[in-house]
Each structure stands twice: as C-alpha cells, then as structure tokens.
Image (spheres, rainbow, N blue to C red):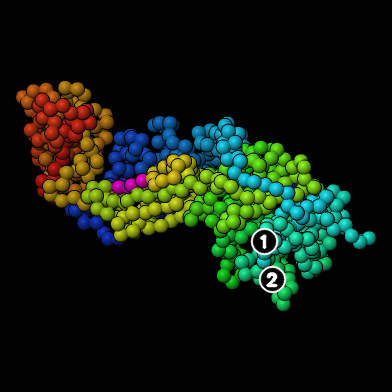
Amino acid sequence: MKKNIIYAAVILLFTVQAFSQTAKLARADKEYNKYAYIDAIKTYERVVEKGYKSADLFQKIGNAYYFNAELAKANKWYTELFALNADQDPEYYYRYSQTLKAVGDYDKANEVLAKFTQKSNTDGRGKLYVSNKNYLDVIKQNSGRYTIDNSDINSEYSDYGSALYNNKLVFTSSRDTSGFARRKFQWTGQSFTSLYTAEINPDGTLGEPEKFSKKIDSKFHESTPVFTKDGKTMYFTRNNYNDGKKGKDTKKVTLLKVYKATMENDKWTNVTELPFNSDDYSVAHPALSPDEKTLYFASDMPGSIGQSDLFKVKINADGTFGTPENLGNKINTESKETFPFITDKNELYFASDGQLGLGGLDVFVTQIQQDGTLSEVQNVGAPVNSSLDDFALLIDTKSKTGFFSSNREGGSGYDDIYKFKEDIELPHICEQLLTGIVTDSETAAILANAKVTLFDKSFKSIKVIASDTAGKYSFEVACGESYYVRVEMPEYTTKEQHISIPKTSGETDLPFALEKTVKTVTVGSDLAKTFNIEIIYFDLDKSNIREDAAIDLAKIIDVMKQYPNMKVDVRSHTDSRASTAYNDKLSERRAKATIAFMVSHGIDAARLTGKGYGEHQLVNKCADGIECSEAEHQKNRRSEFIIVSM
C-alpha cells in the first residue's frame, strides 16, 4: 500500500539554494584625522587604478564591493582578477557570475557558472556514489546492531507507519474490508487505510488492534500520525478530503495533506488542514521535534529536489506556522526521502531510495546539531534494512526498542510492522565544535562583539553570532563537512575563510586576525608593517627594483602623496649570510635604489632619507655561524619605511 499512497502522492523536484549576499563592510564611526589615519582599502584601489596588478589586490577590492552588495563595482575588479589569472577558487567563479548578471552580461555569466559547476562538488546520486564507492563496506560495518521480530498486529493487508500514544501503538492499516459499501483503493484492491491502535503489554507484545477514532476516519486514506507529549494534539496524513469535500489538483488527482486534530472530552475533534497544504502538491508523514516547536514532513512542494523531499516548519507559540524549509541536499536527493522521525536526542531517522543503500527504501539516520545543521548521514544497516523497502522507523531511546515497516519477504501482508531492539548503538553521532578567537592583526588585541557568520559550502547562511568578551566564537558543525566563516567588525576589513571539518569528533580551531580598515600611524610608525610588507624584493646581489617590489612601493608612494607633510626614512636590511662589509654595501645600494624609485614617481627627495643597515640590526638569533632556516633568514631581509615627521 505504501508504494501507491506515498510514492504516487508524494512527488518532488529539487530546490535552488539561496545564497546569502547581505554582508556589509564596516565603516568608520568618526571622521579620519588626516594626519593620523590611512584608509588602506582606498589606498589599495588607487594603487591598482594606477596600473599595478596583483591577484591579492583584485580579490580584496572585489570582495569589499561584493560584501557591500555593490555588484557592478565588484564586477570591475573580478573581471581584472580573472584577466590576470583565471585559476581561482570555485567561490570566485560564483561571485563573478553573479556580478556579470548584475551588469546584464548573462551569456558570460552562464559560461562562468558552468565553470563553477565543473570546479565545485555538486550534489546528486552520481556524486554520492563517486565519493562513497565503498558504501557497502560501510553498511556492513553498521549492520548487526539490532534484533528484529515480526510484531503481533500484522494482517494480510498493508500495515505500516506507527506512532506511540498513551502506552499504545497507533498504526496505519488497510485491513478494514467489512461492509458492503466499504470503498477500495483501485490501485491495490485493498481498502483505503485507516488508523488502528494496539495496547503495548508489559512484556512488549501488542494487544488486539482496534479502530483508533471514528472522528478521524474518513472514506479515504488516513495514515502516519504523531502526537504531542500531553496527548492533546495530533498531526496525521489524509487524502485531500475534509468536511465531506474532496479536493483535486489540475490533473483531477486527490493528493495528500497533513491535518491537525485536538482532544476534547476524550474525543478527537477540530480536524483542520495545515496552512501550507495545497491541492497542487502533497504533504505527508508529520514528525515533531523534541521541543514540539518544529514539524517535519515529506512533500513535493515547490523548492523540492526529487520525487519526495523532507521539510521542516516552525510551530509558533500562537499555533500558527512559519514558512516550510527544505532540509537540503545533504538529506534530499533526486529520488525519494520520506517518513521522518525525530528522537528525544534530536536524531532524524528517515527513509530514502536516493541515498546509498541495500535496495528499495532504506532507513538512514543523522544528528540534528544545535544550530540546525546535520551530521553525516548513516545507513542503519541490516537487519533493519533489506533489499526491499524498509521505512517508518521509530525508537524509544530509553528502552532502545522500537518499530519499523517493511515489505520484505516472509511477512504477513503487503507491508508489515516489525519490532526491534537496539543491541549496539550506531556510532553515527560525530560531534564537532568549530571555534576561534578574533584579534587585531597588528596588536593581537582581543576583539569582542565581532559579527561571525557561518555559511555552508554553498554559501547559505546557517547562523550569526558575536564574539564574546574573550574574542571567542563557537559553532556546532557537522563532521566531514565544509564551511565558510566570515567575520565583520566596525573599522576592520571583513575577512572570510574556508574550513573542512574532520570526520571524527573533536574541536576545530579557526582563528581570525583582522586588519584595520583605517590604519593608525604616527611618527615612528613603519609603513611596511602598516601594509604587511615584509620585504622589498631584489634579484640576488642586485639593487634594481623588481615588478613585485614596485607594487609594494606604490602603496608607500600613494600614502606620501595623500600626506604631503609626511617624511620617511628608508631602511634596508640584509641577513647575516655573506660578509659584513658586503652586506653593508648591498643594503646601502638598495636603500638608494628604493629612494630613487620613489623620487622618480613624484616624491620630493627632501622628504626622504635612507640608509643601509646590512646585518647590524638582526631581528632574531641568525647571526654569523648560527644555523637557521630560510624562513628565519628572510625575517632579517626586510625594508622599513619609518615616519620621521607628519
């Protein structure tokens, strides 16, 4: 019966995920003191506009406009970025395509989006298999954890989809064939399903089934109920029929809807359909979260990926409902996902024939994290799963007993309800905490109240929090997943990082060191440190300015032009390798070459002084005769641009 009621009625297509593009770059709250602050972002832009090219600069400016929703301006810099180097991370392809659409170039936007698709890990059943070719071995490892037995209530007809209520099992059955006028479902020749109940005896056996409620029963299908803990409210599935009226879609098919009923004077009454139902698509198989504030269900409503997707919807305090949300492509595939059940531990069990299984519908489980994300999906293995359809699992986590439905060989009827005991808990719960500290990149000062946003791998916003007084942030995340984290802070440049979470439980550290959007400088400040210039590069044993050095010098030149009273002392240093005399002369030549370059680009020579210090001012231990790494030596090969007056 399940195939006809559920598969024919619950038909779904895939959702286009929304991408969060609302992040804003922080702006200064006060006017800049023209002698004490430098707007680094504007400086970088002016440098690039003067002809200096760098992928880092193009990314930074493009991102600044993109995060500020100025897509047309971002397009200019992303176009420059891809013209300079087309080998970029996949996310830049997506951002570039979005900005191309913003300027009306849809043909090129589609070309770039196609490249994004090629470079990124798209979802789908084929991708699942490619990344999990050993899935049968994994299922085998998960198998053997349950002891199952046929329940005492099965008939020769279809019995499935159970729920616990007041120490009773309420289930779905088409066994009612009594009465001359009893309607039958023409696809199976069996009666339309109704809800039945059976007492759960102390030894775990089930009593004699009887009809659940005449008030709930109609002449069409009823199935898959769920009850609130106080027993006063139930949600259940029924064909599109209420108050004697039958609804049909445009093809004159009566689909499924979820209804709500309340208990009054020991009778179920006030049967009403939920507001997100429709005559044009099916909604079925309700399940409640442990706090009863969220309803889960299966549907083919707009925004679906396959024949049947799982959704959730918020139940508001006043009894109204929010907007249904698709659970996403971690759960949903192009095939069928259906029959959700949520445990008191916030575990989501569901059935799917799109996830990798043993055949037909298999039962899967995932952990719903505190922030709403989902852990890795696990097949619960045999003997719950078989080569045929296995579905509608429910479990009491305290007694570790439960029920599921199957049409496997050896049953009593079309579908049967089986009881089981979990002997060994499935090790599906992998817990990961993503944490980090937000600091000032220059001073290492703790930054409290920074806005921290967690995105999934498709850049859908998951959660937004603020760093605490210790600068710390933390998110509960799913093992084995990829995320993006974005940090924003007034007067700092927005920063974004990608992180891949391990597949084992633990804590993943992702610190953020933010740069000031407005750089504070005074007499004695080193402009090289202000712009993170560690070294002005020269060819070996030479003092001519290389192209990559020219880009960094352009930043210094631009600042000095913005502040005409600023005077700078240029200091060139070497490491200890080669003789002291040689290093003195080399550093002196390089200091003079640097000054000459700056003068040739419009800086008055009277504003510049300079000297080569050779190896006399080493910043670490790496003096003559001491073995050091290349990285340690490089720290000594530095250029300094010290402000001597403003």
Label ID, residue 262: 2
User: Height in image: 513 above or below 169?
Assistant: above
Q: Which residue carries the number 1 mark?
A: 202
Three-letter amino acid code at the position of disc 2: Thr
Label 2 Cα neighbours within 10 Å, binned few <14 / some 14-19 / many ≥20: some
| Label 1 vs 2, first from the N-terminus | 1
Looking at the image, which residue is at 66% across and 42% down? 383
Rendered residue at 58%/60% (across/down): 289
On screen, residue 297 above or below 611: below
- Residue 510 in magenta stretch: yes
Q: Which mark is residue 416?
A: none
Find residue 91 and report its horizontal and vertical position in percent.
46, 40
Does residue 329 appear anywhere in the picture? no
* Residue 461 position within the rendered picture, expressed as x and y whole percent measured from the top left: 48, 52
Amino acid on which disc 1 is placed: Pro
Depth check, front residue: 222 or 644: 222
The stretch in magenta equals: 509-513
Q: Which of marks 1 and 2 is in front?
A: 1
Find residue 399 and report its image quarter. Answer: bottom right
Q: Quadrant of residue 568?
A: top left
In three-dimensional space, the C-alpha distance between marks 1 and 2, rounded to whole angstroms, equals 28 Å
